[in-house]
Image (tube, rainbow, N blue to C red):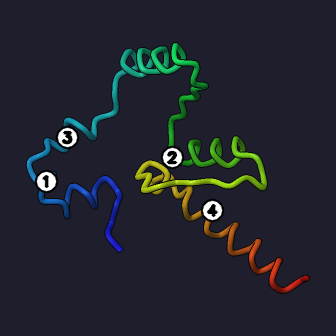
């Protein structure tokens, strides 16, 4: 399977070979973040800004109701905060419980 993380894409995709990694890897200023939040809120999106990958993962885990179906088609962000790993572990646990304790 291909490495779809940011660093994996930059390293392995020839179309991205000339990308200025430092420019796009830089954390945006508070001003840019605030403008982005406002623009999203203007379109009625709920926005929460977090500071770390761990905070992002915890927010995703507590925001998504138990028992719902979640689709994460090729989300680099969700992969980088380990959300897909979290889903796999929990799905495996649910399948184990279902198959072994009918």
**Residue at (68% x, 75% y) in the render:** 92
**Residue at (76% x, 80% y) in the render:** 96
Residue mark closest to the camera, 1 vs 2 = 1
Answer with the quarter of the image where residue 13 lies. Answer: bottom left
**Marks 1 and 2, how far apart at CA:** 27 Å
Q: Earlier in the sequence, mark 3 or mark 1?
A: 1
Q: Quadrant of the C terminus?
A: bottom right
> In the image, residue 30 lies at what x, y percent?
40, 19
- State yes or no: discs 2 and 4 in contact (Cβ < 8 Å): no
Name the residue tied to disc 2.
53
**Marks 2 and 4, how far apart at CA:** 16 Å
> In the image, residue 67 lies at what x, y percent?
78, 55
Q: Quadrant of the N terminus?
A: bottom left
Q: Secondary structure at mark 1?
A: helix
Answer left or right for 28 relative to 20. Answer: right
- Res. 87 mark: 4
Name the residue tied to disc 3.
22
Name the residue tied to disc 1.
15
- State yes or no: discs 1 and 4 in contact (Cβ < 8 Å): no
Q: Earlier in the sequence, mark 1 or mark 4?
A: 1
Q: Secondary structure at mark 2?
A: helix
């Amino acid at each position: 399977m291909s490495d779809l993380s940011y660093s994996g894409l930059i390293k392995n995709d020839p179309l991205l070979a000339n990308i200025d990694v430092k420019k796009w890897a830089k954390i945006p200023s508070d001003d840019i973040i605030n403008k982005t939040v406002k623009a999203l809120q203007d379109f009625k999106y709920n926005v929460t800004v977090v500071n770390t990958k761990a905070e992002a993962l915890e927010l995703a885990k507590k925001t998504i109701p138990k028992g719902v179906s979640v689709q994460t088609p090729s989300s680099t962000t969700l992969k980088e905060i380990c959300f897909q790993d979290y889903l796999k572990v929990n799905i495996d646990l649910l399948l184990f419980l279902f198959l072994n304790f009918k």
